[in-house]
Amino acid sequence: MIQKHLKSSYVLLVLVTSLLLVVACTNEQNAQSESENKKNTSDATEEIPDTETEQNPLVYVNNQEANTVQIIDPTTYIVVSTVDVGEKPTYVQVTPDGTYTYVVNSKSEDVSIIDTKSNKVIKTIQVGKAPKGVNFTTDGKWAYVINEGEDTVTVIDVIKMEKSAVINTGKFPHNGISSPDSSKFYVTNTASNSISIIDTERQSVINTIEGVKDLPHNVTITPDGKTLWVTLTKSNAIGIVDLKVGEMVETIPVGKGHHVIDLTNDGKFAYVANIGDDTVTVIDTATKEVIKSIKVGQGPHGIAITPDNKEVYVPVTEENILVVIDTTTNEVKQTIETDAFPFFTAIVGSRGTAYFTESSRAENHHSEEKISETQKTSNSSQREASKTVLESSPFLKTDETYTYTFKDYGEYAIHCDPHPYMTMTIIVKDGEKMGEQAVEIKNYTYTPESLEITLGTTVRWINKDTVQHNAVIEK
């Protein structure tokens, strides 16, 4: 009996021991499996690249007829987002830190601010009449919006996203660029043939460079801050402005039409888009010689060079494409389809905003918000003096014409919408009916610039330039 009981106890002990061993082995295997999973997860995490830091800066192109901005991944050349903005977006620029993109809408006369992380418009700021160019101080504190229609610049505090000042300039200002240390901002005055120099601390014009002849339009600056490169619309050239002596010292012939210019960040090469002959001119800045002319398509306008200087982006207005140039070969390597009438393009660092300096980071150029009473009075007077638009012709290509019959007495002001410094006057008086009168549009000028006619006379405008013009009739 005792032996039987001992045998049963022994069997039970063996069973319990076996069960404990199984449980222990299972736990060890689970522990090993969990450890391996953690290791694999850790290894996988280490192998995943940080796409946010490695991603190339995105490219922004504004489409004037579609009222959109398209955002393009320069790695895949794919449009990753399309953003609705204001009416007739003309110029676009990215803040130096890449946080925001400012889009100037010429018809709605405002600026759309796009958050570059969400790709959404987060604020719209009203600016002056017929705004065109926009750029930033290199420290990213101030944005300057050039109001071509009222001869002013609107200053925006980038951090607060508020208007800070309005500054009077020369006639028909068009675009601007910051000095590398952010202390000054230079504005081209197309109709005055001059450049206004703005002190960014006082937010006022402290000097004007005269004699920048032949309709200065767009502008950039060399990395050393010593020289402005200015596009000269009338003479189809680039003007070199020596800032130390305060005058234009040299010109370089380029292609036809009004132009947009950008420099590589090392300052070695300039790329110029020539809307009138469908090319991009490449200039060696050391020798100041043209080294190549690149055919890109019909109506190139706008240009932006990537921060690594490897690619140049050019919107081609008449073909609804964005062209990519390889700077090692200076050949077109890619075309990207866009919305209607791509007019301008930007990437972080393009057109001077990449020239960061220690002084521009350290110095604080913020000043109190201020709009002087004289400026307010001047702007108010300009608004009161504004005329009523009676007719606006379509854009005329070369040899295209437009006619208008004047049926009321008085004085009429005519200007070109894309080039408002082009003006003429027509006076309608009593008298015998006249035959049709011709006005030639050539070299960015209406000829004749003044005309006296009688009631019921028809005027015909004919475009002889290689770029598009129109006739806006006001009274």
Image: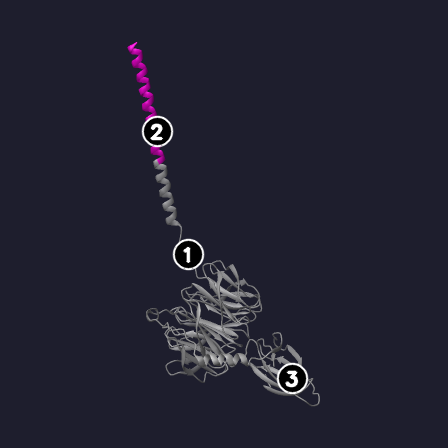
| 38 versus 134 height, above or below | above
The CA span between labels 2 and 3 is: 103 Å
Select label 2 or label 3 by which is in front.
Answer: 2
Q: Earlier in the sequence, mark 2 or mark 3?
A: 2
Q: Is residue 236 visible?
A: no
Kind of residue indicated by mark 2: Val
The x and y percentages for residue 85 are 53, 65
Q: Earlier along the polypeptide chain: callout 3 or callout 1?
A: 1
Q: Is residue 118 left or right of residue 88?
A: left
Q: Is residue 333 above or below residue 254?
A: above
Quick check: is 3 in the magenta stretch? yes
Magenta span covers which residues?
1-30
**Which residue is label 3 attached to?**
438
Give amino acid for label 1.
Glu
Q: Secondary structure at mark 2?
A: helix
Alpha carbon distance from label 2 to label 1: 46 Å
- Residue at the disc numbered 1: 52
Q: Which residue is mark 2?
A: 23
Q: Identify residue type, mark 3.
A: Ala
Q: Residue 211 magenta-drawn? A: no
The secondary element bearing badge 1 is classed as: helix
Task: Estimate how packed mark 1 is, as few (under 14), some (14 to 19) or many (20 or more) residues with alpha carbons within 10 Å.
Answer: few
Label 2: how many Cα within 10 Å (few below 14, some 14–19, many 20+): few
In the rendered image, residue 231, in percent from the top left (x then y), is placed at 48, 77
Q: Is residue 117 left or right of residue 364?
A: right
Residue visible at 43% across and 58% down?
A: 55
Q: Residue drawn 41% across and 56% down? A: 52
Q: Is residue 157 left or right of residue 474?
A: left
